Amino acid sequence: MTFEDNGYFGLYELQQYANSQKILELLKNERDFVIEDLYDDISPTITGVNYDTGQFFVLSTRPDTMAIKIIEIKEQYTLTISKEERKATLFGQAVELLTDRELQVVQVYYQGRKNDLGLSSEYFHEVLIEAQSKLCNYLGNQRLKQIKAFEEQRKAELRQRISQP
């Protein structure tokens, strides 16, 4: 089966999984910066400046409102980061299926490794297609397993709710 035949996982999704480790690192850094910045904004009163008019003004932020906002943003980052961690883990498992040559080509194509392999462009492309096919098939099958497990869990929860008086 080639990746073109796989209706569940294509090259776009593969690109997302291949970049998940970089995205994960960026998200963690961004989260720390955003949360720190929000904590800096907790103040009963903040003085601001309208640079166009040169006038000062006062902003009031309720600490309880800001605390709720911080909690919500932390939760959003936690969910997004855990999703990217799952993608990175699955991609790491998927590349273990590749030959050494396929792994090198994937690293060049998706992860910015310098192309010092000395392969002809035709052979590079052949190896890349084979690697993409393996990766898409593995990741697509893993996604199907996750979907089926989620559906089974949901059905069990619904059965339990229905059976309770």
Image (cartoon, rainbow, N blue to C red):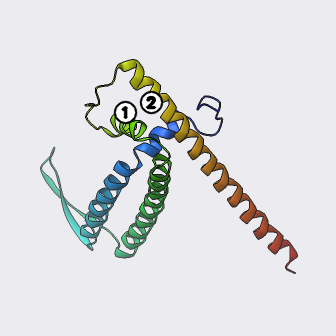
- Looking at this view, is 91 or 115 the one in front? 115
Give the left or right position of residue 5, taking residue 122 as reference: right
> Residue shown at 37%/49% (left/top)?
23
Q: Answer yes or no: do the residues labelled 1 and 2 have beta carbons within 8 Å?
A: yes
Is the residue 137 above or below the residue 60 in the image?
A: above
Report the number of numbered marks: 2
> Residue shown at 25%/31% (left/top)?
116
Which badge, 1 or 2, comes first in the chain's sequence?
A: 1
Q: Which residue is mark 1?
A: 109
- Tell me the kind of residue under disc 1: Tyr
Secondary structure at badge 1 equals helix
Secondary structure at badge 2 equals helix
Is the residue 69 above or below the residue 144 in the image?
A: below
- Residue 29 at what x, y percent from top left? 28, 58
- Residue 74 at what x, y percent from top left? 41, 66
Q: Quadrant of residue 125?
A: top left
- Tell me the kind of residue under disc 2: Leu
> Residue shown at 24%/70% (left/top)?
45
Q: Quadrant of the C terminus?
A: bottom right
- Looking at this view, is 90 or 73 the one in front? 90
- Residue 62 at what x, y percent from top left? 35, 72
Q: Quadrant of the N terminus?
A: top right
Report how far apart the C-alphas of labels 1 and 2 lie in the structure.
8 Å
Mark 1, Cα crowd under 10 Å, few <14 / some 14-19 / many 20+, is some
Q: Which residue is mark 2?
A: 128
Q: On residue 30, which mark appears?
A: none
- Residue 57 at what x, y percent from top left? 20, 59
Is the residue 146 above or below the residue 140 in the image?
A: below
- Looking at this view, is 33 or 92 the one in front? 92
